Amino acid sequence: MDEVLKFNLKGKGASFSKPTYNSSSIIQTYPHIHKVALLGILGAIIGIDNTGYKRKKELPKFYKLLKDLKIAIAPKKLNFNKCVDVVTDTSGFSNKISPNVGSTYLINYEILINPSWDIYILGDGEYYNKIKKYILNRSAVFHPFLGRNHLFADLSEVEILNGEFSKELSKIDSFFISDNVVLDEDEILLNEKLYLFKDSMPISIDNRKIDGTDFMLNQYSIKSLTFSNIDVLKSEEDLFYCGDKVLYFI
């Protein structure tokens, strides 16, 4: 049996910014927390800083140290309501290439309202044990937030569970990589209680270097992820059976 740390992660709001703007100049959020953002939260809890990311010549320190953690994310809802938060930037850096250098700048961030996810971390290694210790003790070196520093994260319902990997197929209770799983999608035509959510989200950071430089791309590596209660016909990865939940670790 393998050990798993499980907790609920929620907040009044969350914003995990996409690296693009829409036509309304709104910085859109990914619809759910993704693995890289979650690793950042775990890094904050145990006191890992972001120095590497600022230098751009190496991977962010939290990611370099925690990237091998196996994580399953189970949202409480398919979609969370959204709003737009207008932030005033008075630093002058946001518009330094505009004619009005140094003036204030309004930034529109898309915010998820009252998001909530159950998080599962597969027990393995030094950093898992450190994360487990901090979360079980309800402590943190840096206060975790959900993408923006005024959107505080709340961790609760902490449990240590046990489970095991199996080749047995079943519906999956967490996000999974779409290309690695085949669903019986014909079912959804016959049962209105079935659902299927699919979106492209980050699962890692690209560690390639920019040609001719020592600088890393440090861009998200994106995969299509699915969350669904449709039966699985085929999975390239063994599924993890943990109590009444079937998990896919990313």
Image (cartoon, grey):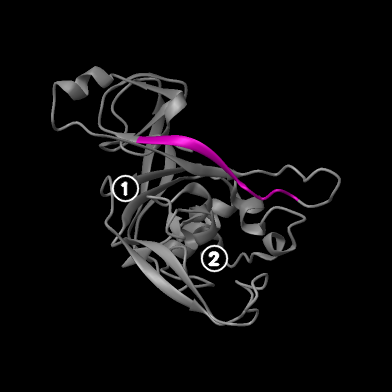
Q: Are marks 1 and 2 in contact (CB under 8 Å)?
A: no
Residue kind at label 2, given as amino acid type: Ala
In the rendered view, would you say 115 is above or below 106? above
Locate the N terminus and report the quarter of the image it occupies: top left
Which residue in the structure is indicated by mark 1?
75
Q: Is residue 238 magenta?
A: no
**Residue linked to disc 2:** 44
Answer yes or no: is residue 151 visible.
Answer: no
> Residue visible at 43% across and 55% down?
29
Residue 209 horizontal/vertical position (percent): 77, 45
What residue is drawn where x is 27% and y is 57%? Answer: 81
- Left or right: 95 in relation to 88: right
**98 sits to left or right of 180:** right
State the SS at label 1. strand
Q: Main secondary structure of the magenta part?
A: strand
Q: Earlier in the sequence, mark 1 or mark 2?
A: 2
In the rendered image, residue 104, in percent from the top left (x then y), is placed at 54, 81
Tell me: residue 16, above or below residue 222: below
Amino acid on which disc 1 is placed: Pro
**Circle 2: element type:** helix
**What whole-number distance in Å separates the C-alpha atoms at marks 1 and 2?**
22 Å
| Callout 1 crowding tier (Cα within 10 Å): few <14, some 14–19, many ≥20 | many
**The magenta stretch spans residue 217:** yes
Q: Which residues are magenta?
A: 216-226
Q: Residues within 10 Å of mark 2 (few under 14, many from 20)?
A: some
| Residue 247 vertical position relative to residue 185 in the rendered view, above or below | below
| Residue shown at the point (60%, 81%) measured from the top left | 91
Front residue of 95 and 109? 95
Number of labelled discs? 2
In terms of depth relative to the viewer, which is nearer, 91 or 47?
Answer: 91
What number is the disc on residue 67? Answer: none
